[in-house]
Image (tube, grey):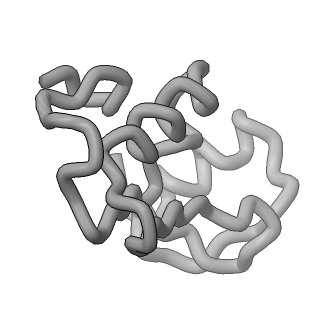
Amino acid sequence: MNEDGRQLPFKDASFDVVFAGDVLEHTNEQKRLIKEALRVFKPGGYAQFVVPNFNSFWEGHYGMLWFPGMSKEAAKKYVRWQGKD
């Protein structure tokens, strides 16, 4: 299985629940990933796709207070200032 979910090694309609947490923003092929997730999804089941809110004051990857709209350069400095990599 590849790490981005574009080709899952499961038969069609294999699962009652499909969950993808903080995945869609890490691929350039969101439609393909969603189609593949829905392919393995049983009719009448439950699918949940969680995506980050880029306007949030919480940064989930680092687990820290965040200031939306920071430039990449400012964000890098802020992350380092917080002792994160």
The tally of labels here is 0
Q: Residue at x 54, y 42 (%)?
A: 24
Q: Is residue 68 left or right of residue 39?
A: right
**Image height check: is 62 above or below 27?**
below
Tell which residue pokes out farthest to the front in this image.
43
Horizontal and vertical percent position of residue 3:
23, 29
User: What residue is rendered at 44% in x and 72% in y?
Assistant: 44
Residue occupying image coordinates x 28% and y 49%: 13
Q: Is residue 1 above or below residue 37?
A: above
Q: Nearer the viewer, residue 57 or 48?
A: 48
Q: Position of residue 19 (x, y in %)?
A: 36, 63
Q: Tell me which corner region of the image, top left, top right, bottom left or bottom right, holds residue 46.
A: bottom left
Using the image as rendered, state which of residue 28 and residue 80 is in the foreground.
28
Which residue is at 13% across, 28% downward?
9
Q: Is residue 36 above or below residue 45?
A: above
In the foreground, 61 or 43: 43
- Name the image quarter holding residue 61: bottom left
The N terminus lies in which quarter of the figure? top left
Q: Please provide percent x and percent y for residue 55.
A: 81, 67
